[in-house]
Image (cartoon, rainbow, N blue to C red):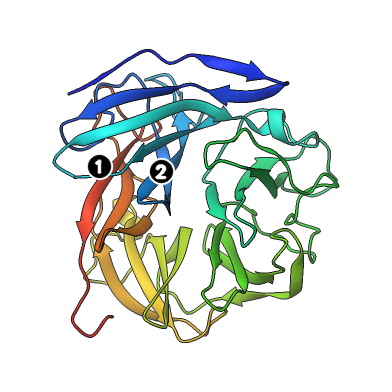
Amino acid sequence: MWSFTSAVTLLLQGLLVAAQTTITSTGNPIIADGSYYSADPASLVVNNTVYILSGRDQAPANQNTFVINEWQMLSSSNPNPAGAQWQFRSNIARPESIFSWAAAGTAYAAQVVQGPNGRFYLYAPVTQRSTSSSDRFAIGVAVSSNPWGPFTDAHPSGPIVSQTIPQANNIQNIDPTVLLDDTGRVYLYWGTFGALRGIELATDMVTTIGSAVSVNSLTGFFEAPWLLKRRGTYYMLYAANNAGANSPCTPTSYHACITYGTSSSPLGPWTFRGVMLDIVSSTTSHPGAFELNGQWYLVYHTRDASGGGHFRRSVALDYMTWNDNAS
């Protein structure tokens, strides 16, 4: 169960601004009554508060395709899997409201990160309105003074990744994850359907450096990469649909689990390490990990909310622990 005060969406100087509401969650998923479905969580910690970006699943109960038109955000200074008070902002951004080159809809798995200049950058997979490429998906970047927006296009000339940018490719360019390394350098990974790419970004957060690397060593990689660094080691969390013969997430199960790999370098090579979250009730899965006040957490989605389904998912939260050897 959860309770909330009604939200109001405002237009301020032509930009989309979502009013903040307070909800009280008593467990997982965070929003459990089916009033808002939320998928593909991406976490960000700022000033002892975690912000969780998600897409809003809006597919009718009998429809077996994704309908995701906008992003929304949860935040809390005291998250707890057993229940907590959260701030909720609905409709913080829509693809067509940010990017002049983007079509409406397909507000897929995105991430907000804080750049070295203190501003907040939204890495968003959206569809191009006009392109000669076989796949219309591309990754755009928007910027704001707040984690929740309002966002404006940080690269008005177009996407920073597509089937033609920064180099020709034939993959579907979605599911971006970005790490601002403690070295001061910035790295972007993205990919789905078994294809994972990585590249360095300049500190302007939009300019790619060099050529993209292809990652083929992460067992069962399907989609939803999440890049983090801890104690000098780089970790790649991801949704896998085949993590070995003894794994529950085999292709015949039609469910993904969350697995991970490690590297001593931000662009690999990567070594597969194992499964960290078994299959959940939804077929898809999407990790996000964060540390707040010395405690690590994992966010993901399930179909466990009232009226939920594989295309009506909801964000959940669990504690995450590490082995003593930091692996």
Q: Nearer the viewer, residue 10 or 262?
A: 10
Quarter of the figure that contains the C terminus: bottom left
Q: Would residue 69 be visible to someone looking at this image?
A: no
Instruction: Examine the rendered structure and indicate whether residue 228 appears above or below residue 80.
Output: below
Q: Is residue 241 visible?
A: yes
Q: Quadrant of the N terminus?
A: top left
Q: Position of residue 303 (x, y in %)?
A: 29, 35
Mark number for residue 281?
Answer: 1
Instruction: Give the x, y percent position of residue 85.
Output: 24, 32
- Mark 1 is on which residue type? Ser
* Left or right placement of residue 35 versus residue 280 in this view: right
* Mark 1 / mark 2, whichever is N-terminal: 2
Residue 128 % position (x, y): 76, 40
Helix, strand or loop status at disc 1:
loop
Residue lying at 34% horizontally and 50% vertically, measured from the top left: 254
Q: Quadrant of residue 11?
A: top right
Characterize the local packing of mark 2: few (<14), some (14-19) or many (20 or more) Cα atoms within 10 angstroms: many
Judging depth in this view, the residue of 243 and 81 nearest the camera is 81
Name the residue: 20% across, 56% down: 319
Examine the rendered structure and indicate whether residue 161 appears above or below residue 32: below
Residue on which the image places disc 2 = 52
* Residue 162 position by quadrant: bottom right
Between residue 279 and residue 262, name the one nearer to us.
262
